[in-house]
Amino acid sequence: MDTQKVSLFGLIVLGLFTHPVTSRADAPPVFVNAWGSGGSGNGQFSTPKGIAVDAAGNVYVADSGNHRIQKFAATGAFITKWGSLGAGDGQLSNPQDVAVGQSGDILVLETGNRRVQKFTATGGYLLKWGASGTGDGQFANPFGIAADGQGAVYVADSFNHRIQKFTESGAFVVKWGSQGSGDGQFDSPLGVAADAFGNVYVSDTNRKRVQKFTGTGVFVGKWGSSGALQGLFNFPDGAAVDFLGNVYVTDTGNNRLQKFTSDGVFMSQWGSYGTGQGQFSTPFHSCVASNGDVFVSDSDNQRIQRFSPQTPVESTTWGRLRSMFR
């Protein structure tokens, strides 16, 4: 590669990280596989809620009603589980969400115990933080957690109507939000996501909208209102992002997922009420793997569904960039 190409490549990559390239027309992903049924056995669920995927493609599910975490391969093959009902270290009470930290450790948010617990990828207990209350580092029915891959953790402290930011060791960093309908205010936010560009997205559930912030809580933008048309929401619960910065919103009351650019421009949607492939009954959360596969916790159907993009990630922005400089 000659010097001129190197310089051009550097300029393009810089532009992508400061102004990520996103399409505003996107075909919805296609169904790949599903797993799960109601019950307490391995691979069975009782209202699965939070879901996360690690760099190796392993999927972690907050099996809320069974008070445990289950780990699977992307195919749905059961790997391991941990947790039981209680308040001790490694025990869980109504785990609502799960995230993968910078080093691959697993962060579990418990609504019942109002805390975060950190585990190894095989379920070994590491540490915990949080308690019931309104102070810094305290929670009131927290429902969502996200890790940004840079060592920061964000918690949707739902009934305190705020977002709290921590280090992965549980040290409090900053908080923002209060109850209301203004910019930067919330009404029971249930989901939070953080992208690779320093942005934080919050599912402001009762306001039927998504709000976008910097990693320090500075308001950037918002989109959505009540309804069933494209770009509208009916109690959106979860939020997730892919490596290009696109945002996936679990539009729970409408039994669908909606995909947006990082600025809130509608891209695609899929799902309807039902039990068939690609249908949902109260979906709560989703996550996106590095290859673009989307995993959805289809809660009332007691299962996980997996979808793949119709256009492989390799053939989109990064693939085209690489082909320019081969």
Image (cartoon, rainbow, N blue to C red):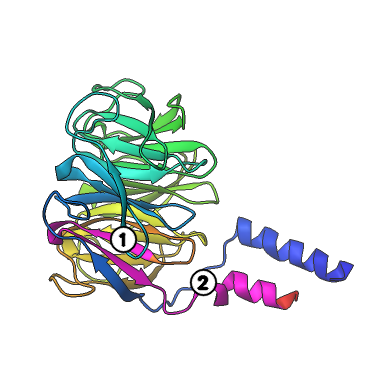
Q: Position of residue 77 (x, y in %)?
A: 31, 60
Task: Say whether residue 227 is left or right of residue 249.
Answer: left
Q: Residue at 72% across / 77% down in the picture? A: 324
Q: Position of residue 139 (x, y in %)?
A: 27, 28
Q: Give SS at disc 1.
A: loop
Residue identified by numbered label 1? 77
Q: Nearer the viewer's eye, disc 2 or disc 1?
A: 1
Q: Residue at 88% across / 67% down in the picture? A: 3
Residue 57 sits in which quadrant? Answer: bottom left
139 magenta-colored: no
Q: Residue at 41% across / 74% down in the picture? A: 309
Q: Identify the disc placed on residue 313.
A: 2
| Residue 138 makes an appearance in the image | yes
Cβ atoms under marks 2 and 1 closer than 8 Å: no
Which stretch is magenta? 294-323
Task: Say whether residue 227 is left or right of residue 198.
Answer: left
Instruction: Check disc 1: other Cα within 10 Å, few if <14, some if 14-19, many if 20+.
Output: some
Q: Residue at 87% across / 70% down in the picture? A: 2
Q: N-terminal of the two: label 2 or label 1?
A: 1
- Mark 2: amino acid: Val
Residue lying at the far right of the rendered structure: 3
| Residue 216 makes an appearance in the image | no
Residue 132 sits in which quadrant? Answer: top left
Give 209 or 280, whichever is nearer the viewer: 280
Position of 311 relative to 87 (above/below):
below
Instruction: Check disc 2: other Cα within 10 Å, few if <14, some if 14-19, many if 20+.
Output: some
- Mark 1: amino acid: Ala
Q: Quadrant of the C terminus?
A: bottom right
Give 323 or 76, whichever is nearer the viewer: 76
Q: Give SS at disc 2.
A: helix
Q: Position of residue 157 (x, y in %)?
A: 29, 34
- How far apart marks 2 and 1 lie (CA) works out to 24 Å
